[in-house]
């Protein structure tokens, strides 16, 4: 049960801090930095307990990678953590004009492709860096990748990369019509990274 609670609390922290920075109106650079820093901290805190997936797309990709069914059981807790964080922000900032929702500023097709790509890169980095088995390096590399992806793609897509990050703000802002995109694209991107990683690993071992 500790691992499931770790996923709930870790995702809660991610959504609270990241979308909280948007609600507070911080500049784009600092919003991106907040997302990257909180991911780093959540991995350092909860990595030893659950692996700190804090992202349903990551959990699905890990299931495809190693067949561990426990990864899929994390997903309801991740989604609950995102919803609770969004509810907390709603209570704290009831008059805010935004709930930190992810919406396409680019076209829907462009947004879909960008979300697939940045989640693909994020998951590929995760698969590559976890081989080092050094928690500080793992946390920094993943957090920095999240920062770069958010800085690059945030103005165009919201740089979700994470269905749990998008769910709560969409529900609280009544903008759930785009949730299909922010569920399917990150899951597809993360899943595609698994065969690519396996292909390159096979080449290296031959």
Image (cartoon, rainbow, N blue to C red):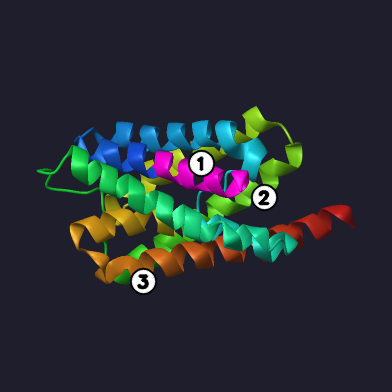
Check if mark 2's residue and mark 1's residue have beta carbons within 8 Å: no
Residue 97: x %, y % from top left: 11, 47
Residue 6: x %, y % from top left: 55, 42
Spatial distance from mark 1 to mark 3, Cα to Cα? 24 Å
The label shown at residue 127 is: 2
The label shown at residue 180 is: 3
**Dot 1 corresponds to which residue?**
145
Spatial distance from mark 2 to mark 1, Cα to Cα? 13 Å
- Please state which of the two labelled residues, at mark 1 or mark 3, is closer to the viewer: 3
Closer-to-camera residue (177/155): 177
Residue at image location 69% in from the left, 46% down from the top: 128
| Residue at the outermost front position | 1
Highlighted range, magenta: 1-14
Residue at image location 41% in from the left, 54% down from the top: 80
Closer-to-camera residue (61/77): 77
The kind of secondary structure element at disc 1 is helix
Q: Quadrant of residue 30?
A: top left
Q: Quadrant of residue 35?
A: top left
Q: Is residue 62 visible?
A: no
The label shown at residue 85 is: none
First along the sequence among labels 2 and 1? 2
Residue 48: x %, y % from top left: 66, 36
First along the sequence among labels 1 and 3? 1
The kind of secondary structure element at disc 3 is helix
């Amino acid at each position: 049960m500790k691992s499931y609670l770790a996923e709930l609390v870790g995702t809660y922290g991610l959504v609270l801090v990241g979308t909280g920075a948007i609600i507070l109106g911080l500049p784009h650079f600092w919003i991106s930095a907040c997302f990257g820093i909180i991911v780093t901290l959540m991995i350092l805190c909860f990595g030893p307990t659950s692996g700190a997936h804090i992202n349903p797309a990551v959990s699905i990709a890990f299931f495809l990678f190693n067949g561990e069914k426990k990864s899929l059981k994390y997903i309801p807790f991740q989604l609950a953590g995102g919803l609770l964080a969004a509810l907390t922000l709603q209570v704290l900032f009831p008059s805010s004009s935004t709930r930190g929702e992810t919406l396409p500023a680019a076209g829907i097709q462009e947004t879909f492709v960008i979300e697939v790509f940045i989640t693909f890169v994020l998951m590929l980095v995760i698969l590559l860096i976890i081989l080092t088995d050094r928690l500080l390096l793992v946390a920094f590399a993943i957090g920095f990748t999240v920062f770069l992806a958010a800085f690059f793609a945030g103005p165009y897509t919201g740089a979700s990369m994470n269905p749990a990050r998008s769910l709560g703000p969409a529900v609280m802002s009544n903008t759930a019509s785009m949730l299909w995109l922010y569920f399917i694209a990150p899951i597809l991107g993360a899943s595609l990274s698994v065969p690519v990683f396996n292909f390159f690993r096979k080449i290296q071992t031959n």
